[in-house]
Image (tube, helix red, strand yellow):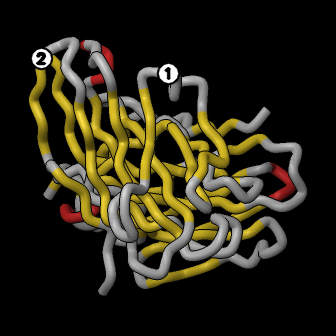
Amino acid sequence: AQKVTQAQTEISVVEKEDVTLDCVYETRDTTYYLFWYKQPPSGELVFLIRRNSFDEQNEISGRYSWNFQKSTSSFNFTITASQVVDSAVYFCALLSGNTGKLIFGQGTTLQVKP
Amino acid sequence: EPEVTQTPSHQVTQMGQEVILRCVPISNHLYFYWYRQILGQKVEFLVSFYNNEISEKSEIFDDQFSVERPDGSNFTLKIRSTKLEDSAMYFCASSEGGSNTGELFFGEGSRLTVL
């Protein structure tokens, strides 16, 4: 079975704090892709990153960084020096196969207070 | 920057009515998808579509739902005889290749409210 678990339902931080959003996935496939999407209050889904299962290199993009660890089936997302504009729901998602069926986690609501 | 566009952004309908949600995928994309998000819940896969046919559908996508690519640009989701529980945000997405070769681009969503 394929599953994505985001155990943190809501996180509240104060601006400039670092915050890590957890994502744990389950799949039997050897080839798969992991994604993070941001959903701001306006409702659209904003693509943040895609990683394939063969690339465990961590990635940094500005204040965002991702830690992919196959050994623990985790793909965690860290925001450094958080800002109020980071307030949103963040979804982790898993894709395997070729049909576009993304399996989303339940989402983590991040609130960054000024 | 090319984008997926969806219309309407919000539709209110009475229970039992038929609804058509429209999507214009990115022009050179070949794979199309519909996802659904009930308010406050996670995003759920409905259906994928390639080469004018459904390639995969979820258990949610029953006979009440259908998809169509009536011309070279539009990709539609039809919901027959809407129910209260169909109220949700519906996202269209497209990708250039199969989803394991590229990013899924999502539209901004169509919010459906069934009264």
Q: Kindly tell me whether residue A15 is visible in this rendering.
A: yes
| Residue under the image location 43 percent in, 67 percent down | B105
- What's the residue type where badge 1 is placed? Asp
Image location (x, y in percent) of residue B91: 35, 49
In this rendering, the label closer to the viewer, 1 or 2: 1
Label 2 sits on residue: B14
| Residue under the image location 43 percent in, 59 percent down | B93
Q: Name the quadrant containing residue B11.
A: top left
| Residue under the image location 71 percent in, 64 percent down | A68
Q: Nearer the viewer, residue B48 or B81?
A: B81
Q: Tell which residue pokes out farthest to the front in this image.
A: B71
| Residue under the image location 44 percent in, 35 percent down | B66
Quarter the N terminus of chain A occupies: top right
Quarter the C terminus of chain A occupies: bottom left
Q: Nearer the viewer, residue B84 or B75?
A: B75
Circle 2: element type = loop
Image height of B8 relative to A75, above or below: above
Relative horizontal placement of residue B110, taking residue B33 as reference (left or right): left
Image location (x, y in percent) of residue A28: 88, 44
Q: Kindly tell me whether residue A112 is visible in this rendering.
A: no
Image location (x, y in percent) of residue A106: 48, 35
Image height of B27 relative to B11, above or below: below
* Residue B63's disc number: 1
Label 1 or label 2, whichever comes before in sequence order: 2
Determine the chain carrying the residue at label 2.
Answer: B
Image height of A94 relative to A81, above or below: above
Distance from disc 1 to disc 2, alpha carbons, whole Å, reads 19 Å
Relative horizontal placement of residue B113, taking residue B94 as reference (left or right): left
Circle 1: element type = loop
Q: Judge if badges 1 and 2 mark residues of a common chain.
A: yes
